[in-house]
Amino acid sequence: MTKQILIVDDHLLVREGLRLIIESNDAYQIAGEAENGEEALRLVDQLQPDLILMDLNMPVMTGLETMKRLRDKKIEIPVVILTTYNEDDYMMQGLALGAKGYLLKDASRATLFHTLESALRGETLLQPDVVEKVFASRQAPVQASKSGLPDLSEKEKLVLQAAARGYRSKEIAFDLGISERTVKAHLTSIYNKLGVDSRPGAVAMAIEHGLIHL
């Protein structure tokens, strides 16, 4: 079944380029295009796309504000963020809001489709080069004991570090020599300790408070 994608970006050339690439794959179809978040919200109600590919920095309504509105309306369509290397703080906030992945605007065709596929499966794919750029741009991490957050166990830190690098639960289980069920149990424990409800939220919190180091 063809998956319907909504592209949200204020640059026409970016939208046209994405349309050409995405529609070269028979598994996807562009349901519509929007040049700002306000227009995107109208199209979401109208088109009910399977996935939203969205820029962060737009006039009228930003990508972050659009994600907040979607969350408030309890719309659970996966969102993949389009970003550039100078939007690190926005990227952090997008993770906390539940973005299913990030795409640099110069990403390869293979990376684009890999990210879309993961998001549509309900997985979060964080490209290592994007995550490492975020880490490099942050100031020296604060100590977890000063952050007011509970400490994570060593195994939980390893699981979360792997998640931050974009590994899936099955891959984490293989690397750590544990079952996939155990990985998911560790993730649930991490979410409870950090007061979040998703892998992106946990990664964002960990980056912000220096709980993990890549």
Image (tube, grey):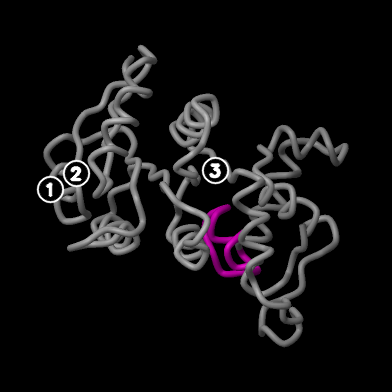
Left or right of 98: which side holds 20? Answer: left
Q: Does the magenta stretch include residue 204?
A: yes
Residue at x 76%, y 84% (from the top left corner) = 145
Q: Mark 2 points at which residue?
A: 34
Reply above or below: 11 against 142: above
Quarter of the image with the C terminus in it: bottom right
Residue at x 49%, y 44% (from the top left corner) = 104
Residue 205 pos. (x, y %): 60, 68
Residue count near mark 2 (Cα–Cα under 10 Å), binned few <14, some 14–19, many ≥20 = many
Residue range in magenta is 192-205
Q: Which residue lies furthest to the top in this view?
A: 26
The residues tagged by marks 2 and 1 sit, at their Cα atoms, a distance apart of 9 Å
Residue at x 65%, y 68% (from the top left corner) = 193
Quarter of the image with the N terminus in it: top left
Residue count near mark 1 (Cα–Cα under 10 Å), binned few <14, some 14–19, many ≥20 = few
Q: Mark 3 points at which residue?
A: 124
Q: Which residue lies furthest to the bottom in this view?
A: 146
> Of helix, strand and loop, which one carries label 3?
loop
> Of helix, strand and loop, which one carries label 2?
strand
Left or right of 34: which side holds 144? Answer: right
Give the number of the mark in front: 2 or 1.
2
Reply above or below: 102 against 180: below
Residue 178 pos. (x, y %): 84, 39
Residue at x 43%, y 32% (from the top left corner) = 120
Q: What's the amino acid at mark 1?
A: Arg
Labels 2 & 1 near each other (Cβ < 8 A): yes
Q: What's the amino acid at mark 2?
A: Ala
Q: Mark 1 points at which residue?
A: 42
For residue 30, which quarter of the picture? top left
Q: What's the amino acid at mark 3?
A: Thr
Residue count near mark 3 (Cα–Cα under 10 Å), binned few <14, some 14–19, many ≥20 = many
Residue 182 pos. (x, y %): 76, 43
